[in-house]
Amino acid sequence: MARLFGTDGVRGVANIEPMTAEMALQIGRATAYVCKRHDRRGYKHRIVIGKDTRLSGYMIENALTAGICSMGVNVFLVGPMPTPGIAFITHSMRADAGLVISASHNPYQDNGIKIFSRTGYKLPDADEDEIEQLITSGHIRDIRPTADEVGKALRIDDARGRYIVFCKNTFPEDLSFEGLKIVLDCANGATYKVAPIIFSELGADVVTLHNEPNGMNINDHCGSQHTQDLRTRVLAEQAQLGLAFDGDGDRLIAVDEKGEELTGDHIMAICAKIYQERGLLRNNLVIATVMSNFGFHAAMKKLGIEVGIAPVGDRYVLEMMKERGAVLGGEASGHMIFLDQHTTGDGIISALQLLAAMCAAQQPLSELARVMHFAPQKMINVTVKQKPPLEEVPVLQQAIRAAEVELGDGGRVLIRYSGTQAMCRVMVEGPTVETTNRLCQSLADTVKKCLT
């Protein structure tokens, strides 16, 4: 049986294993069981549940609630709210855990369950392993409190307001958005209510796109992965910038006043420079992943900032940040962690930090983005029939070495398997678009010959 928990909780197509109501009930029961070991000193154990705007969220929310209550733990329901908002509410309300029903940037037919610990950090691997073992062994089905000990579900109406205040408090009090026009793309997802309020209350003139969720339009040609509408609207409105969130609000992609898209690497480079200038960049260190652009590394080297390289996944970025004492880390996809502000990646807080850099520098975003030159990049996904260790495929290794010799110090090659699909990802970054595309296609052809 495949492992239930991936790098970011449980995820799959809604109403198909493992994202069924039956599995959600078991996850709720097992999570409640693990949480009951916390010493509540006479208080009832409690778990927060939030979700994004997917239609299947209702089904999974009710199943999780039933499972948790059946184990004698109370449930606090907060409704649609960004994933980082659930992390904040869980910690601030001193709950035992927080569950988020979301598949992040995936299409509406997918869904998932992410679990935060009482500290506001993602649940440790050991606790996820125990939850999975309780479910797969069937042991959790035999543990049942008596009827007078079951839990109850309560709706928390002020959770959204608490999170709004928390986010606003991360923005420097001596700065203001007065005079700024900002276009927000809420991806018809979890930020659709809170984001416009936060930026408006801080003084910005806000234009909002894709903030009318219907349960099936989340991430649908909008949000952080599809910025064309945002780029067009920024130019039409003559706005200073555009901000695109993903479905659960933990990612940010920006658009400058000229309509150019800025990746997470650009945003991290801008914020790293400002943090360094202000003496806030602890240990003069930023944590990135193997997917960060070659240009990001060149920019950090020029600034004298060390870059730690973590595996792909915000969980691994956070682990390395804590191990090495970094306050800034993230991924090119726009999932960034400002550890001096929050315990997890938060698209809204990332946007506030970017805007703080703009306001402090009193420069347009396009000028700030010049700190980094984005190296031409090409990625080709190749469907494979087998996944032998890549280092044990001689023909492919020879082709990789030849490409690396041609690139020299002007680029790099990264070939890795997908963790969830029968796919090999071939990525090349180089000095020109022509060289980059040619080498990537050649390597992809080699992968096809060797692995299909």
Image (cartoon, rainbow, N blue to C red):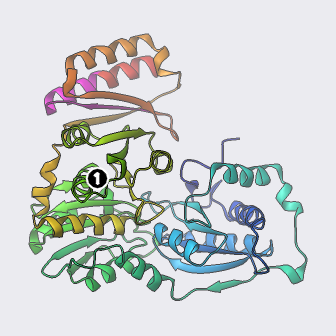
The quadrant the N terminus occupies is top right
Tell whether position 243 is magenta.
no
Residue at 49%, 50% in the rendered image: 322
Q: Can I make out residue 91 in this image?
A: yes
Res 187 → quadrant: bottom left
Give, as a single range, the part of the protein colored magenta.
424-442
Q: Percent from the top left, x then y, of residue 264? A: 30, 52
| Residue drawn where x is 28% and y is 53% of the image | 268
Q: Which percent across, then down, holds residue 102?
A: 52, 64
Q: Determine crowd level at label 1: few under 14, some 14-19, many 20+ residues with C-alpha closer than 10 A.
A: many
Relative depth, front residue between 66 and 317: 317
Q: Can residue 192 be seen in this view?
A: no
| Place of residue 15 in the rendered image (x, y in percent of width and height, measured from the top left) | 62, 61
Disc 1 on helix, strand or loop? helix
Q: Which of 215 and 11 is in front in this view?
A: 11
What residue is disc 1 on?
A: 268
Q: Is residue 438 on the magenta stretch?
A: yes
Q: Which amino acid does label 1 sit on?
A: Met
Instruction: Relative to 380, say whether 354 is above or below.
Output: below
x then y, percent, for residue 399: 32, 15
Indicate left or right for 448 with 155 as reference. Answer: left
User: Residue at left 45%, top 79%?
Assistant: 163
Give the quadrant of residue 346.
bottom left
Image quadrant in which you'd find residue 367: bottom left
Tell whether 267 sits left or right of 218: left
* Residue reaching furthest to the bottom: 157
